[in-house]
Image (cartoon, helix red, strand yellow):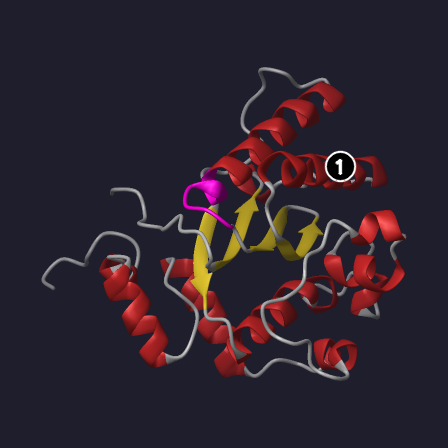
Amino acid sequence: MGRALRTDVGGQVYHVLNRANARATIFAKKADYESFEAILEEAKEKAGMRILSYCVMPNHWHLVLYPRQDGDLAKFVNWLTLTHTQRWHAAHDTVGQGHVYQGRYKSFLCEEDAHFIQLVRYVERNPLRARLVARAEDWQWGSLWRRLHGTPAQKKLLDEWPVPMPKGYVQLVHEPQSSDEVDAMRASINRGSPYGSDGWRSNAIQKFNLEATLRPRGRPKKGT
């Protein structure tokens, strides 16, 4: 099966994620998380990438990015993952012992309206949903903690959102997302399709030739 189609266009919001090979734990201690966040800061400096939200989990991470120019997304994420892989192996004395990530990163367009807020909520409530913390803002390895508790230097990693932050946003993060929201988000992740309203999504699919993202992944069943 060919590679999934994806875009790399400036001026668009993207949900980007990658998982550890075989879903292994690659962030097991404080130093693992700190190393990744340091690399994230370096990648931002090198590429001038706008980072709107992120969350680092034990075996995967999510980023919400807002590249300025065409091609910036791939340059940023490829440097980030390659550098993290090299430094992870060096730190764990496992150079030459296999892949850290399961494969290429995934990226999905997101509409800059209420769907953007839904996306950031989904990303920032990850540790709460996984029951790693009692309050989402207590998870140190993400943008919600950094935005609320980080030093001025730490907050420089994050850029202004393209839509206003809702009043009472932190409380909103703690409210369970509807099954429809979660299902739509997971469908976007599983198929690589844009996340947004029906009309916007249809236009984005046509504009960027993403018709293949409407079809389920995998081989078609026999007789269909």
Q: Quadrant of residue 221?
A: bottom left
| Screen quadrant of the N terminus | top left
Q: Which residue is mark 1?
A: 38
Tell me: residue 13, above or below residue 171. above
The x and y percentages for residue 184 are: 45, 74
Tell me: residue 112, above or below residue 142. below
Q: Secondary structure at mark 1?
A: helix
The x and y percentages for residue 37 are: 74, 41
Q: How many marks?
A: 1
* 48 and 110: which is toward the camera: 48
| Screen quadrant of the C terminus | bottom left
Q: Residues within 10 Å of mark 1 (few under 14, many from 20)?
A: few
Q: Of the residues shown, which amino acid type is indicated by label 1? A: Ala
* 147 and 22: which is toward the camera: 147
Q: Is residue 66 left or right of residue 184?
A: right
* 133 and 62: which is toward the camera: 62
* 169 and 44: which is toward the camera: 44
Q: Quadrant of residue 161?
A: bottom right
In this picture, which residue range is highlighted in magenta? 68-74
